[in-house]
Image (cartoon, rainbow, N blue to C red):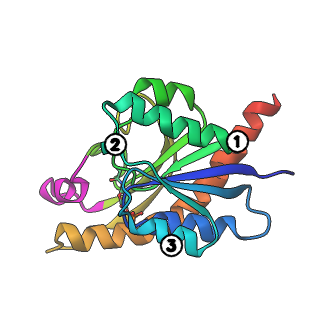
Amino acid sequence: MSRLRLAILISGRGTNMERLLEAAAEDGFPAIATLVLSNKASAAGLDTARNAGVEALAIPHRDFDDRESFERAMDQALTDRGIEIIALAGFMRVLTPWFVGKWAGRLINIHPSLLPKYPGLNTHARAIEAGDVEAGCSVHWVTEGVDEGDVIAQARAPILSGDTPDQLANRVLAEEHKLYPRALAEACRLIRQRHAS
Ligand code: GAR
């Protein structure tokens, strides 16, 4: 069975991206890493991708007058490469309804909370502040509402007494790294199923 052409969108260090590239390099994984795209030229993850032999492209959002023209440039790059699934991995720009609509059903994101809890930013501080005993991460389909789409898979991590947001973030990140390749494979399966029926 042919593999879906995967683009990974990042804004920074790209440790989740690295796990996805490793998974996609394995025999039998249902996606092939085709493009890593960043809205910041300084994103460390771009070098990681190049070193892994994957095309890495910066499209700095600051070069554009508005959100939609930035997204049209991204969309062109994705379309030119025949991308079939997009994984957001620490991509820190909110996407417009136009882009989300264009890629609906082919766009997934990883978020560092047990959605529907704590959409948006500062998830770990908010979970600690609320007195929660567990935190976690979610991979979900991207829809117009920020962090609101259906969840594909989640993983949990305990919140320990005295945890700082950074300590918790590291514990959750280790779970993200295991979760995302598995959830991406599941998303590929669901896309194939949808397009076969
Ligand atoms: C990850 O923890 C990811 O869940 C989070 O940013 C981090 C990126 O780390 N994403 C969001 O907060 C999206 N709203 P990475 O660049 O090392 O993968």
Sequence-wise, which precedes: disc 1 or disc 3? Answer: 3
| In the image: residue 176, left or right of residue 31 | left
Mark number, residue 22: none
Instruction: Give the CA distance from mark 2 to mark 3.
Output: 23 Å
Q: Is residue 92 left or right of residue 189?
A: left
Label 3 crowd (10 A; few <14 / some 14-19 / many >=20): some
Q: Which mark is residue 48?
A: 3
* For marks 2 and 1 on the same chain, the one whose residue lies earlier in the sequence: 2
Residue 29 x %, y %: 73, 61
Mark 1: few/some/many CA within 10 Å (<14, 14-19, 20+): some
Return the x and y of residue 164 as percentages of the image width and height. Answer: 16, 71
Q: Earlier in the sequence, mark 2 or mark 3?
A: 3
Magenta region includes residue 125 = yes
Q: Tell me residue 110's x, y (percent).
A: 44, 52
Looking at the image, do the residues carrying marks 2 and 3 touch, with CB atoms under 8 Å apart? Answer: no
Count of residue discs: 3
Q: Secondary structure at mark 1?
A: loop
Ligand number 1: quarter of image = bottom left
Q: Secondary structure at mark 2?
A: helix
Task: Give residue 13's position: percent from left, percent from top.
Answer: 38, 67
Type of amino acid at the residue the image marks with label 1 = Gly
> Residue at label 1?
82
**Which quarter of the picture shows residue 117?**
top left
User: Between residues 157 and 80, which one lies in front from this camera angle?
Assistant: 80
Report which residue position mark 2 lands on.
Answer: 63
Residue 85 painted magenta = no
**Quick check: can you spot residue 145?**
no
- The amino acid sitting under disc 3 is Thr
Question: Looking at the picture, does residue 146 appear above or below residue 164?
Answer: above
Asked if disc 3 is less than 8 Å from ligand 1, the answer is no
Specify the segment rendered in magenta: 121-134
